[in-house]
């Protein structure tokens, strides 16, 4: 399935992923900050990345009408991260998720993409509420979520035995 642009901001495009994004995806999910703040997905080869893109992104987009999107710079189409929506079986509501390569943090890209995804959830998908989770130590993500308008509502147990901070945002 070829990629398609879903959202556009002044500096960024958010689009669906395809097999050509496998090298970027492999790099992102194996970055130490991704593993530390999110989790180790066990993706170690381009073949693993292609399969994860198919089952975890393309199939989800087709089934749900949303997924995590590749975030790329409009200026040169360089992939810098992921941002989008996820329906986790552990959570009642859809949550926002994101991850960026370290060299693209601290430049406002995550906020710009995140706000576009929130507007997409509200205006296109007509969701009433969005949620988010972060590991307890991930203050950068916490600050981003608070800046976007989420509120911390609880610390909850997670399926891997850890605890996560739980955030929510009312959209309508």
Image: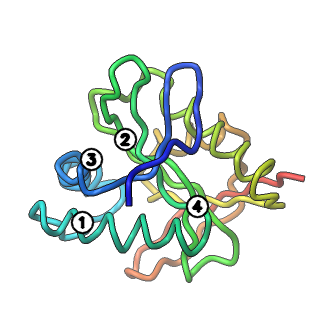
Nearer-the-camera pick, 101 or 165? 101
Q: In screen coordinates, is 7 left or right of 98? A: right
Left or right placement of residue 78 versus residue 156 in this view: left
Q: Nearer the viewer, residue 105 or 54?
A: 54
The picture places residue 27, in percent across and down from the top left corner, at 18, 48
How many tags in the picture?
A: 4
Counting residues from the start of the chain, the first of labels 3 and 2 encountered is 3
Instruction: Name the residue furthest left.
Output: 45
Which mark identifies residue 26? none
Asked where in the image residue 130 lies, by quadrant, the reply is bottom right
First along the sequence among labels 1 and 4:
1
Q: Position of residue 134 (x, y in %)?
A: 49, 57
Q: Which residue is mark 4?
A: 66
Callout in the foreground (1, 2) = 2
Q: CA distance from mark 3 to mark 4?
A: 25 Å
Q: Quadrant of residue 39?
A: bottom left
Q: Tag 3, which secondary structure?
A: helix
Of marks 3 and 4, the one in the foreground: 4
Q: Using a 10 Å C-alpha cutoff, classify the residue at mark 2 as few (fewer than 14 neighbours), some (14 to 19) or many (20 or more).
A: many
Residue extending furthest right?
Answer: 172
Q: Which mark is residue 81?
A: 2
Vertical arrangement, residue 77 with respect to residue 116, above or below:
above
Q: Could you tell me how far apart the alpha carbons at marks 3 and 2 are, in whole angstroms?
A: 12 Å
Of labels 3 and 4, earlier in sequence is 3
Upstream in the sequence, badge 1 or badge 2?
1
Tag 1 residue: 40
Q: Is residue 106 left or right of residue 146?
A: left
Q: What residue is disc 3 on?
A: 33
Which sits earlier in the primary sequence, circle 1 or circle 3? 3
- Please tell me how crowded label 3 is: few (under 14), some (14-19), or many (20+) other residues with Cα within 10 Å: some
């Amino acid at each position: 399935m070829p990629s398609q642009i879903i959202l556009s901001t002044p500096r960024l495009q958010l689009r669906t992923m395809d097999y050509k994004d496998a090298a970027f995806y492999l790099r992102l999910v194996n970055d130490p900050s991704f593993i530390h703040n999110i989790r180790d997905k066990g993706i170690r080869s381009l073949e693993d990345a292609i399969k994860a893109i198919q089952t975890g992104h393309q199939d989800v987009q087709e089934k749900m009408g949303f997924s995590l999107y590749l975030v790329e710079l409009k200026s040169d189409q360089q992939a810098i991260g992921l941002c989008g929506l996820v329906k986790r079986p552990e959570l009642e509501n859809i949550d926002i998720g994101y991850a960026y390569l370290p060299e693209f943090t601290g430049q406002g890209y995550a906020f710009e993409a995140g706000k576009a995804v929130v507007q997409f959830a509200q205006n296109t998908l007509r969701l009433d509420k969005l949620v988010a989770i972060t590991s307890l130590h991930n203050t950068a993500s916490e600050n981003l979520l608070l800046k976007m308008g989420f509120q911390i509502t609880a610390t909850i147990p997670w399926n891997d035995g850890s605890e996560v901070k739980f955030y929510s945002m009312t959209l309508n």
